[in-house]
Image (cartoon, rainbow, N blue to C red):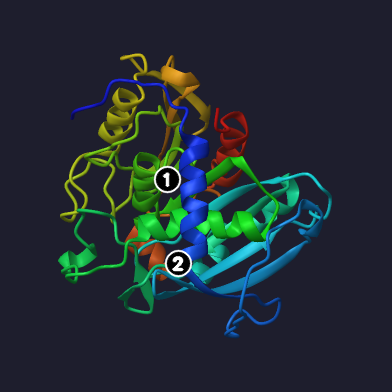
Amino acid sequence: MSTKEPASFNNSARRRVVAMALVSVVVLALGVSNVSRSTPVSAASTPKSKCGSTSPSSTTLSLVVRGLQRTVIVHVPKSAGGRSSLALVLNLHGSGSTALEQEELTKMNGTANADGFIVAYPQALFPDGTGFDWNVPGVPLVHERSVKSKPPNDVKFLTLLVGILEQKYCVNAKKVYATGFSGGAREASQLACDDSSIFAAVAPVSGLRRPTPCPTNRSVPVISFHGLLDKIDPFAGHGEKYWTYSVPSAARYWAEQDHCATKATASTPAKGVKLITYSSCAGGAIVELYNIMGEGHEWPGGPTLSTSITSLLGPQSNAVSANALMWSFFVAHPLP
């Protein structure tokens, strides 16, 4: 797969100014609520944030962005309330799922409370059963469903969402990250290519891809997790049309993209876990892939699934905590 030569990457501030300007144009309404998650909310405007105004909360935002109604759950940690800016993690749900289900699956609010960062759970728009799918550019939907002629631009939505949250909360612009599960992991992989001036690092879970084309000229730190028994997005590739090459190939393609050392190193951080690491990357980046034996299509260290789902996806493994590992990785890799 082709890669781009490294180039100086000093336009982060310029792109963020452009994104913030677009926010003021496309955000037509913003609502907040600290009550029931199912309660629709609305309001007229979003004031410019001051760091002292960010207080602990779990909030549902109802937005109209680029003419489309969007939903985002935002959790501000219990430690918030001071004047220090906080990191922001976008946590994207999988195909056929919802923002609320992703919040419950990953249990990341607890990690945010313990480590002091804001976590936001955006929701996609393509209907899929009781949930929704993300529009990953140029990639087929699950079950080979067709994409309508004018699909929502989720990359643009997520970029603008960061600007919205920066206006509303006390966010450290150098510490904005993206993670996601399955289809959300594929969308997070896309953000690393299309918006690397905004997202400092990404952590795809059960869905690492290296999009083509990948226009970024910045080396993006990537940490990923994948179960060897995954039947939805097979570790060896050769799944549905959106899932062709293997997970190790995806990590290797990212290593090429980031201009890392050609040869990876392997280690065993826990029983049944193999860590593949590509280091000596341009710009201080690194690519890490956790191969988890005995694990299916799941969030490592997450809640145990029902027996019926386990029979489909594979046995559970809690050998590693994706939340803890990705947060340590994020802390080590802010924007330069």
Please state which of residues 309 and 221 is positioned toward the viewer in this rendering: 221
Q: Measured from the top left, where is residue 308 in percent x and y?
A: 39, 70
Determine whether the residue tagged by mark 1 lies in a helix, strand or loop. strand
| Above or below: residue 79 compared with residue 141 | above
CB within 8 Å, label 2 to label 1 = no
Q: Say which amino acid is labelled 2.
A: Val
Q: Furthest-bottom residue in view?
A: 39
Picture quadrant of residue 166? bottom right
| Above or below: residue 41 compared with residue 81 | below
Marks 2, 1: nearer the viewer: 2
Quadrant of image for the C terminus: top right
Picture quadrant of residue 195? top left
Res 204 label = 1
Question: Is 132 on the left or on the right of 151, as rendered?
Answer: right
Q: Measured from the top left, where is residue 334 in percent x and y?
A: 58, 33
Res 26 label = 2
